[in-house]
Image: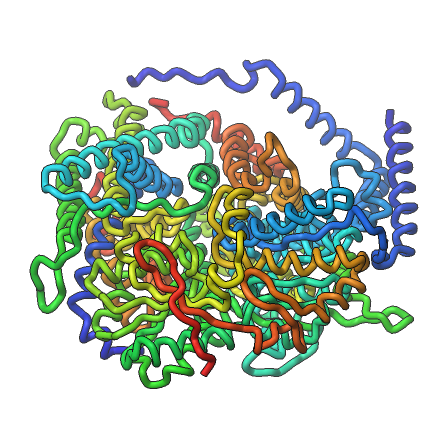
Amino acid sequence: MTTTVNPPSPEQREGLRDRLRHGREAVAQRWHHAPRWVRWVLLAAVIVFFYALPNKEFYQYLGPIPTPGANFTQVLFTVSIYVLMAVGLNIVVGFAGLLDLGYFGFFAVGAYTVAVLTSPSSDIKTLWPWLLVVPIAIALTMVSGVMLGTPTLRLRGDYLALVTLGFAEMIRIAAVSSPFLKGQRGFNQIPHPPGQYTDGKPIFGVLDARPYYWLVLTLIIVVVIGVRNLTHSRVGRAWISIREDEDAAQLMGVPTFKFKLWAFAAGAAIAGLAGALFAGKQNFVNSQNFELLNSIIILAAVIFGGSGNIVGAIVGGGLVAYMIERFRGIELFGVELYEYRFLFFGLVLVVMMIFRPQGLIPNRRRAAEFKDRRKEVTVGE
Amino acid sequence: MRQKLTRVIGGVAMLALVAGGAACSSGGEETASGDKCGNKIAFFGALTGSSAALGINENNGVKLAVDKYNKENADCKVELVELDSQGSPDQAPGLAQKAIDDTKILGIVGPAYSGESEAAGPLFNEAGLPTITASATNPTLAQQGWKTFFRAVGNDLSQGPAAGNYIKNVIKADRVFVIDDQSAYGAGLSQEVQKVLGSAVVGTDKVQGEGKQTEFSAVVTKVKAANVKAVFYGGYYQEAGLIRKQLTAAGVTAPLVAGDGVNDGAYITSAGAAAAEGTILTCPCQPATEARGTFIEEFKALNGVDPGTYSDTAYDAANILLAGIKDGKTTREGLLEFVKGYSGEGVAASYKFVEGGELDPAQVKVWAFKVTGGKVVPDQEIPKS
Amino acid sequence: MNFDDLFSNFAQYTTTGLTQGAIYALVALGYTLVYGVLRLINFAHSEVFIAGAFAAIWTWNGFGLDQNSQVSGVGSILFYLLVAMIVAAIASAGTATVIERVAYRPLRKRNAPPLAFLITAIGASIAISEAFGVYTRRLPEGAPILVSTKPLFHVFGAPIDAVQLLTVGAALAMMVALDMFVNRSRVGRGIRAVAQDANTAALMGVNKDRIILIVFIAGGTMAGVAGLLYDVRIQTLTYSVGFLLGLKAFTAAVLGGIGNLRGALVGGLLLGVIENYASGLFGSQWKDFAAFAVLVVLLMFRPTGLLGESLGRARA
C-alpha cells in the first residue's frame, strides 16, 4: 500500500475542538493586546489570590476547590513544591530539550544534604541550622547535576532518559540500603527555617503550614523571574537552538555541550532547593520519600502543562499534583476514587498526548513546530 | 469590553486582598468541643497502595471495636474516620492536620508504620491529640518527648531478643542466617536478633521489601552455602512467603523464624502450605485460647475475613480510646490523661503505658507460634532472657 | 565486599543468574524488535509481560489449581504448561496490539515527536499496571508448583533442576524461532526492510502498518512466554513486578545492543549473571543498583551496546 492518502487536515475538520481552539486563541490574543497595566494588575491579582489561598477564611468559600480528604494548606504546600520542581524541570526538558526522567533524584540529593547536616540522628552530627545548609544543599545538587551531566549529556533523546532514570533509581537504592543514609529509619528532628513572631512563637512551626507555603510561593516567584531573564538572554537562545536542532546549533558556533550542562545544573539546583524546603517543613526524611513514580509525575506535569513555557509548567505542575490529591475522599459507587488516581493519571497522559501533544498552554514556537511536523507525515501512513 | 475586563480584574483583586487580610487573624484551631455524643476516633494508616495489607488488618480491628461500641451505646454513637496514608511519610502531615482540624476526633489508632509516625508525630504532639499505634515499633518514636504517643505493642527491643532467645534455647541452632527487608521494622528486629545470637550468626543479607523484589535466588544460594540450622527473617509476610518457598524449592529445610510482621494467614498462602510448615512466628501477643474470647468469630462476621497481624492489637487500641469516651472523657486533654493512666486487659495483651508512651515492659509477653498443618498455632511463651 | 562468598558459590550464582537472565532476554526481545523498527522505547512493554503472567495464573486457576496444588504425571504437567503458554502468549500479544493501536498509531499518524511517544508509553504503562493492581486488590496471586525443583544433576557443584532447564530451554527455543522468522521468512524480510528505511520500504510495497503490528505481536508473544516462565519459577505474581523487570529487560536490550536480536539474548543472560555476582559481592540489596550502574556506565562508553545496534543493518 504505497498510495499516499493525506489525512484530512485539521483545518478541514469542524467541530467543538476547533471552536475551543478559537476561543483559546481569542483569550491569548486579548491577553497580548491588553495594555501593559491591565496585564500587571491581572498578574498581581493572581499572585494575591495564591497568597490568600491557604487561609481557611478564604478557601472555605471556594466551593469544590479545597481537598476534602486532607488538610488543604498542607496539600497546597505539596503542590507548591511540585510547581517549583516543574519550573526547574522545564529548563531541562522544555528549553534545552533534554529528556530527564530522573529529576526527582536531585530533589533527594537536596533533602538528604539537609537531613545529614542538620538532624541529630545523622552519623556526623554537625547539627547545623537549616538556613546555613540550604545553600550547601543547592550547591551540592548543582555539583551532582554537573557530575551526572558531564559523561551523559553526549547521549540524546531516549538514551538520556534512561540514564537519568537509572541514576534516580540508584540514588533511591543508596538511600534505602546504605547505613549512612539510614534507609527507612530516616532522619528525624530536622530543624525548621528560622524566624519568630514578636510574641516569641516560631513562624515556621509544626501545625501551621501556611508560612512554608508562602515561603515556597515567594521562592517560586523569584525563581520564575530568574528563569525568565535567563531565557531572554544568550543562554536561553542557545538552549532553544539546541532543542530545535542540536547539530545546526553546533555548526553555528553554539557550544552545545556547555549550555546543556548549564541547563542540567540550573534544573538540578532548583530541585535541590525544593528538596531542602521539603526537609525543613517535613522534619523527617527517609527513603520512602523518593519513589521513581515521582520523577515520572513531574515530567508528565511539565509536558501536560506545555513544555517550554514557564506558565505552562507552573499550571501543569500545580494541576497534576493537585488532581492526584483531589481524588482523595471522593466516593463513587461505594469505591474511593483515590485508589484509582494513577489509573486515571495514566489514561489522561495517553489521551493528552494524542489530542494535545503540545500541552495545555504551549510555548508558541513549540506549538508551531508541532504543526509543522503534522504536515510532514511520511508516506505509507 | 475592555472596561468590563478591568472591572472584573479589580473586583478579583479586592476580594483577594480582603481575604488575605482576614487571614492574618487566624491562629490554631480551638479544641475541646466537650459534647458527650457525636465524637469520632480515627484510624491512620495505609489502606491502599503496596503496603496496605497491614493497615487493612488494623482498620478492620478498629471497625469491629467501633461497631461493638455503637451497638452497646446506640443513643450515643462514635464515628470512625479512616485516614489512608498509603504508608507514605509525605502524605502523613496533611492527613494528621486533617484529623487535628476536625475537633470531634478525640483519638487516633495509628499511625501504622514508623516512617509516617515520625512525620506525623510532631503535629499530633503539638495539637495534643492522643495516638495509640498498633504496629509502629521503632524504639526512637518513644524517645522524642511526644506526650501524645502511645504504643500498644512491644517495640523492636522486646520482640527481637525474644526471637533470638527462641532460636538459641529452643531450636538450639548454632548456625543461623539472618535476612531483613531494610524496613524500619525488619532492620530493627534483625539487629536485635543478631545481638542476642552473636557469633551464631554465620551470614546476613538484605532484600527489598514492599513487593519490590520477588526473585531471591542469590539469598537462597547464600543460605544454602552457609548450611544453617535456622533462618531468621525480619520483615513482612509477602517477601517472607516467597523466601520460604524458594528456600524449600532449593532444598533448604532449616526452619524460618520471623516476627509478627509475618504472623498473617497470607504468609501461608504466599509460601504454600507445604513450604510454610514448621515456620516459627514470634509475636508480642497472646494466643487465642487465653484471652481472646469471641474476637475471631466477631471479626470474621463483620469483615468477612480472618483477623490478620495486628488486627487484635488495633482492636484493643480502639477499645482503650472508646473506654475513655464512654467514661466521659470527651476532650482531647481528658482522653489523653485517660490513656496515660489506663490499665486493663485486651484480647491481644494487657495494657499499661509507661514513660514515653511505651507499653509497660512487664505487660509485654512474647509468644512463639508455629505453622502446623497450614495453620498458625501457639507453641510456647518465650522467657524474656 | 565478600569475595569468599562469591567464589565459593560462583557456579550456583552463575546458573541461577542465567535462568533469570533468560527471562530478561525474552522480555528484552520485545524492546529490541520495536526499537529496531520504530526507533521507539516501548515503555509499556513491561505491562505486556504482566498481562501474560496473569493470564497464565488465571488459566491454572480456571483448571482449579492454586498455590497449594501439586500436579503429577508428565502428561498433565505438559498439558497445563502448554495451555497456559498459549493463553499467556495470546494475552500478551493482544495487550501489545491494543497498546500499539491506542497509544502509538494515532501519534505516528501525526508524526509526533519522540517525546510524545515516550509520554504515552509511560501513561499506558501506568494505566495498565494500575488496572491489574485494582483488579487483584494489590495482593499477590499464587501459581501451582508444576515443575519439580529437585536437583537433576550438578555442574561444578551447582544443582541444576527441571525449572532451570525449562526456562533456559524455552527461552532459547523461542529466540531461535524468532531469529529464523526475522531472517528467513518473507514477513521477516519486510521487518528488516522497514527497520532499515521505513519510507523506502513503504515505496517498495511493504505495508508498514502491518509490519509494525506484526512486530508488536511477535514481541508480545515472547513476553507472554516470559510471563509463563516467570510464574513457573517464582510461583507468585504481584501487579507491580512488571515495572522493574521491564526496566531490567530494557537494560539487557541496551547491553547487548538495542535493535539486535542476538544482542538481547547476550545482554539478558549477562545482566542476570552480573546481578547475582553483585548480590554475592555486596549483598542482595545492591542487586538492582548494580544493574543500573551497568546501564549507566555502558551508555556512557558504548551506547551501541556489546553487539552493536540495529535490526536491519547488522545482518540484512
Is residue A62 rendered to the left or right of residue C173?
right
Please provide percent x and percent y for residue B86: 56, 52
Please provide percent x and percent y for residue B190: 42, 73
Choose between B121 and C209: the one closer to the eye: B121
Residue A6 visible to an observer of this rendering? yes
Pick the quarter of the image with the C terminus of chain B.
Answer: bottom left
Q: Quadrant of residue A308?
A: top right
Residue A317 visible to an observer of this rendering? no
All told, the count of numbered labels is 0
Q: Residue at x 62, y 73 (%)?
A: B358
Q: Residue at x 36, y 64 (%)?
A: B370
Judge whether B293 appears above or below B260 on screen. Answer: above
Is residue C147 rendered to the left or right of residue B356?
left
Judge whether C217 appears above or below C238 on screen. Answer: above
Is residue A216 rendered to the left or right of residue A104?
right
Judge whether C76 appears above or below B151 on screen. Answer: above
